[in-house]
Structures are given as C-alpha cells and as structure tokens.
Amino acid sequence: MSHISIDAHRQRGKISKYIYGQFSEHLGRSIYGGLWVEPNSNIPNINGLRTDAITALKAIKVPVLRWPGGCFADTYHWADGIGPADKRKKIVNTSWGSVVENNHFGTHEYFELLNQLGADAYVNGNLGSGTVQEMSEWVEYMTFNGTSPMADLRTANGHKDPWHVKFFGVGNESWGGGGNMRPEYYADLYRQYQTFLTSYDSDSPLYKIASGPNVDDYHWMDVLMKNAAPYMDGISLHHYALASAWEDKRPALAFPEAEWFSLIKSAQKMDELITKHSTIMDKYDPEKRVGLIVDEWGSWLRAEQGTNPAFLYQQNTIRDAMIAAITLHIFQKHVDRVQMANIAQMVNVLQSMLLTDGSKIVKTPTYYIFKMFLKHQDAIAMDTLDDLSETTSASISKNKDGYFVSLCNYGLTATDTITVDMDSLISTVSGEMLRGTKMDQHNDFDHPDEVSPESFTAITHDSHQLTAKIPPMSVVTLQIDTVN
C-alpha cells in the first residue's frame, strides 16, 4: 500500500522542459544510419534525415539536442564539417572504434535536424584538442548576424541567416577523455575560453556550461564552483546506471533477477548525487543561478552480441523504462537545481529512444516513457506528502486542468494499491500504462509492439480521493482533472 497527499500550496517549482532533453553523438550508428542517411538514400528522408525517425521524435517533443558529443566533441574540428560534402575531410573517430568519419553530418546538417524536430541547440565545443580561436569562430559562424569572416563563410556555404544557439558546453569530461585535467587547471581554462564566446544576440545570450564532475567527484565540483561559478550558467554531471561494476558491463537481455534490482539501485543513486552536488553549489551560489545539467544519463549495459562493442548498441527493455521513470522523477524532485538533462542517447546507442536497422525502425520502452510523461514538461512540480512502498516511485505536477501523476511500480510480483488524497474536488481521471510481463520484455524488428502503452482503468475515486492498483513492472500516468 502507498499513500500520496496533494496540497495545492506545496510546490517545488516549474519543471523545465529541458529535463527531457536528448543527446546524439558521433558514435556507432547514433547519427549515421540512425538519423542521417544521405539525401540520395532509398530510405525516405528530407534533406538526408530519415523521415520515420523524425516523425517518431517529433511525437515526444524533443526540447533540446546535445551534439556532437560526448568524447567525440573534444576531437571534433567544426571546420571539417562544412562546405560541399564530397570535399569534407575524412577523419578517424579515435573515440569510438577508430572508424572513418566522413563529416557529412556537420553544423548545417545539425541545425537542419533541429529545425525538423523543433528542438533547441546544445552545442558542445572542443576544449580538449581545440583552441580558443577555433571555439570562438564556431560561435561566430553559427550565430553572428552581419558581415564578418565567419558569417560570410556561412553565407558562402548556403545559409545567410544565423542560427540560434541556446546552450554551449565548454569541453566534455575534462577530468577524463576530454584532457585528463585537474579541476584547478580546467577552471582556469574554462574562464579563459568562455571569455571569447561572444553572445551576438543580446536578447538571448549563450547559456554557457562548464564540464562538471565525474559521478561523485565532489572535489571537482567544489573547485569549479569556487573558482569559476560567476562565469558559468550551468555545470554538467554524468552518471550512468550500471548492473555491476564499470569494468563488468552486464547483458541487457536474459539477466538474473538480482540485476533487475542492481540496475535500479544504481539509477536511484542519482538522487544522492544531485543532493550532495547541490549542497556544494549552494555554498557558492545560494541564489541557485547556476543550473545542474545532467547531460549524460541512462543505462549502460553490454553491447549486443554480434555488434561492434565500440558502437554501444544495446537492447532496451521494460527494465529500462523503469530506469527512465525513476530518474525523471528524481530530476523533478530537484527542479530548483536541475535545469536540463540529456539521456544517452537518442538513437541506436545505450538507452535510446529508437533502434534502426536499414529501413526498419522500432520504438523502445524508454521512448514510450518520454511520450507518456509529456504533460510534466513546463508544469509545476508538487511537493507531496508520500508514504510509498519500497518498490514505488512517484512524481506529481500541476497543470491548467488539475494534476498529472506518474507512478512506477518496479517490483516484480506485487501490485501496489496507491491512494491519492486531494485538497481539490476531483472531476475526472484518465490513465495510461506501460507494463512488462517478464523482466527483459522488449520491442525488436520482428515484434515492434511487444511493449507499448495501453489504457489504464484500475482506478476508483470519489470527490477528494482516488485509488489506483499499479501492477508490478509497470509505469502508470494519471491525469486528474479538478474543479477549482
């Protein structure tokens, strides 16, 4: 039995739609084959971007897309990815499998993708192997509206008008693959590089994001906030859910019961990480101006057998749906600090929304969680009084019609009967459910609808209380319309 009490006066704050952000890196088939198929492909596309993927992603209203990495960002030189495609430099992707990168997907193609998705830009600059000038000129190339060397080059390459870059990351994982830096050194570099990232649009200045800590490196967070907080708008945090040790990636399918719970426990650590990092941030930024940007999160499991292990292609099951729901609930608990998050990654890599194989495409259970949770975006997170069972996670937000409730019962056998007490008069209640019947139930190209949302009707209610019976291995959303 679980119990939730909603008081209209107890509110946490607005849930930024950017918490539902995505990430797509030059890694495996994330972009090439997953999103980009070339304009002359037999796969239906618009300007080289596959139509089926864009249609599916538009349905979950992707608010922001981080690109080009990840680790790849600190080896990426943007000038290699502009101009006629057949004249672009081919490079070796040393970050992911040492495969040839033809640079056919570059800055112009990225903004075409954003245009088709209706998403905002989060560009990650090259601090690790790049220069201040290179990063500065990229911002000029993308955003300057006028006559200048980079704006003229952009015009020559077919795009006269500037694009809008809302978010800009200065390096990635600078503590590791982005340069193996000490926090003191990176703090000084960050201060230097961001100085030359000019906001050419004074009405919408660049939101500058520093490379933050690796999981629980609280020293890194302290040094960065102490030495560079006034110069940043956000600082990143990365945490992946693991079923075992980092060195022992576990399978996404045919896993034992213990690993259902070990992966969930690892995901739940996000709450502790945000709490402790926020405490450090509060010391230097009590007004909470600087956002915590969780721009890499999700399940990291073993690559599927028969695939290139460097491509990080993993199947996505009902267990991943649990991970998504639990983690999004944690972000919504911390809306005072978490201003954006970007699940890794959008297509064909790690905990993705979509899987593709040639012309075939499938929506994952994680995709459906993002679709089911749409009403949380830009709603008001409620600070509820909860008495939840040990296998239930919940989040409640207020919208114009009433309240939106998302519930996750990640137990394997027991139904949880949840009672919700309201201080408002209940008018109507409608529900939707994503449910698994076995731990590794998933969608594949032969069975694309094995896991998909269905109507949820196990609800009773009177004027001020409702009761819902939530099955095991399920995520349920309820829209409770109220009379004011």
Image (cartoon, helix red, strand yellow):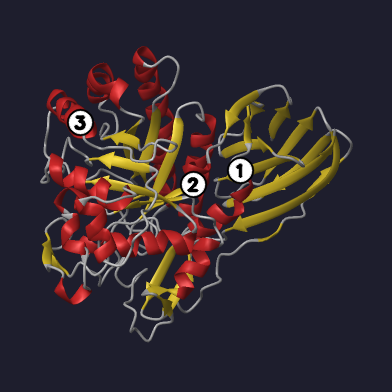
Kindly check if marks 3 and 1 are in contact, taking CB atoms under 8 A apart as contact. no
Q: Position of residue 410 (x, y in %)?
A: 54, 46
- The residue singled out by tag 1 in the image is 376
Q: State the residue in front, 71 or 365.
A: 71
| Residue at image point 32% right, 73% down | 33
Q: Quadrant of residue 81?
A: bottom left
Which of the two discs, 3 and 2, sits closer to the camera?
3
* Number of the front mark, 3 or 1: 3
Residue under label 3: 190
Locate residue 295 relative to residue 85 in the image: left or right. Answer: right
Q: Inspect the image, locate mark 1, and give the three-letter code of the amino acid beneath it.
A: His
Residue at the location (26% across, 19% down)?
222
Please tell me whether mark 2 sits on a helix, a strand or a loop.
Answer: helix
Q: Are marks 2 and 1 in contact (CB under 8 Å)?
A: yes
Q: Earlier in the sequence, mark 2 or mark 1?
A: 2
Q: Which mark is residue 20?
A: 2
Q: Position of residue 373 (x, y in %)?
A: 59, 49
Ranked by sequence position, the earlier of labels 3 and 1 is 3
